[in-house]
Amino acid sequence: MKACVIGLKKQKYSKKLFNQFLNYLQSELPLSQDVRIVLTPTLEGNMTTGVREPNEMRVLASKRMLIDVLRTLIHEWVHEFQHQKLGVPDDQHSPEIGGPIENMASVLASIYLKRFQKKYPIFREELYQ
């Protein structure tokens, strides 16, 4: 699986941190198909902070702390995992708030973000800038 990140330089995020983070996600919630991650400066469509389409995650990055961007990225990654590995169909939309599919993504996003921070304390300062 390859992850292509669009907008990393524009947002001035550390490539080293992002690569480590994506490797961590892939080790914890492995995807089998390539994905495209777009760090967007503006809200698009009906997104709040992120949205997942087949094999693509769009994450609002502008004017947000990196820790919040990564939490959104994990949330959308979980949705991609649900589709690729658990067979949740693309046309099965969960409610914006609540429901088992959405709740799973929210809970796992918090868990894996905390685990990443604990495993890689060298990134702590950068995450909160």
Image (cartoon, rainbow, N blue to C red):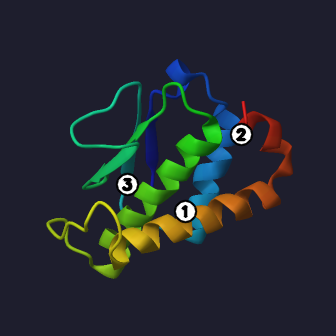
Q: Badge 1 is on which residue?
A: 109
Q: Image point 26% across, 76% down: which residue?
A: 88
Q: Earlier in the sequence, mark 3 or mark 2?
A: 3
Q: Earlier in the sequence, mark 1 or mark 2?
A: 1
Q: CA distance from mark 1 to mark 2?
A: 15 Å
Verify CB contact (< 8 Å) between mark 3 and mark 2.
Answer: no
Residue at disc 3, secondary structure: loop
Crowding near pointer 3: few (<14 within 10 Å), some, many (20+)? few
Q: Is residue 27 left or right of residue 54?
A: right
Q: Image point 44% across, 67% down: which residue?
A: 105
Visible residue check, residue 32 = no
Q: CA distance from mark 3 to mark 2?
A: 26 Å
Q: Nearer the viewer, residue 28 or 126?
A: 126
Q: Is residue 115 left or right of residue 69?
A: right
Residue at disc 2, secondary structure: helix
Q: Residue 80: horizontal and vertical position, in percent? A: 36, 63
Kindly report which numbered mark, 3 or 1, lies closer to the viewer in this rendering. 1
Q: Residue 10: horizontal and vertical position, in percent? A: 51, 19
Q: Badge 3 is on which residue?
A: 34
Q: Is residue 117 left or right of residue 75?
A: right
Q: Residue 61: horizontal and vertical position, in percent? A: 48, 32
User: Which numbered dot is residue 121?
Assistant: none
Q: Nearer the viewer, residue 114 or 95?
A: 95
Q: Nearer the viewer, residue 45 or 81?
A: 45
Q: Tell me the quarter of the picture where residue 91 sits.
A: bottom left
Q: Nearer the viewer, residue 21 or 44?
A: 44
Residue at disc 1, secondary structure: helix
